[in-house]
Image: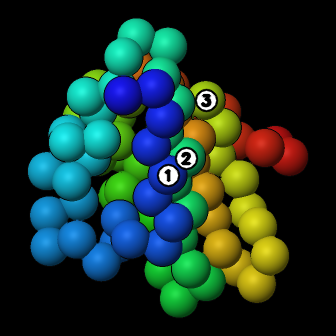
Amino acid sequence: MDFVLAFAVVHEAPDSLQFLKEVAVLKAGGTALCRTKGHVSEAEFSAIVQDAVKAGLRIAEVAEGLAGSRGADGERGGAEPSREGE
């Protein structure tokens, strides 16, 4: 796969790490765009980002969006997340 869009679903999965491992089947250089809704706590969002790294995704960007939504854009690989606006 070249691209995965997971809009407001990762936090609904019973096991976000397993879900993100399935997303991590991206081709080298592939992109995963993951967004959550505003009702996801900062702690839950941070856990999802950590699971993405454990699943083998390199976090390219972590950003706040409208109405408290958060997003993490990942690529196939592995590295530390950058924080937009910090």
Q: Could you tell me which residue is drawn at 36 percent across and 56 percent down?
A: 48
Q: Quadrant of residue 35?
A: bottom right
- Which residue is tagged 1? 5
Q: Is residue 2 left or right of residue 19?
A: right
Nearer mark to the viewer, of 1 and 2 = 1
Q: Position of residue 28 (x, y in %)?
A: 40, 11
Distance in Å between CA atoms under marks 1 and 3: 15 Å
Nearer mark to the viewer, of 1 and 3 = 1
- Which residue is tagged 3? 60
For the residue marked with disc 2, what is the amino acid?
Leu
Q: Between 43 and 39, which is closer to the camera in this rendering?
A: 39
Can the viewer see residue 17 in this picture? Answer: no
Q: Quadrant of residue 52?
A: top left
Label 1 residue SS: strand
Q: Could you tell me which residue is drawn at 63 percent across and 65 percent down?
A: 70
Q: Quadrant of the N terminus?
A: top left
Residue density around tag 1, few if under 14, some if 14–19, many if 20 or more, within 10 Å: few
- Which residue is tagged 2? 33
Residue 75, placed above or below residue 52: above
Q: Could you tell me which residue is drawn at 70 percent across and 79 percent down?
A: 68
Label 3 residue SS: strand
Q: Position of residue 46 (x, y in %)?
A: 44, 57
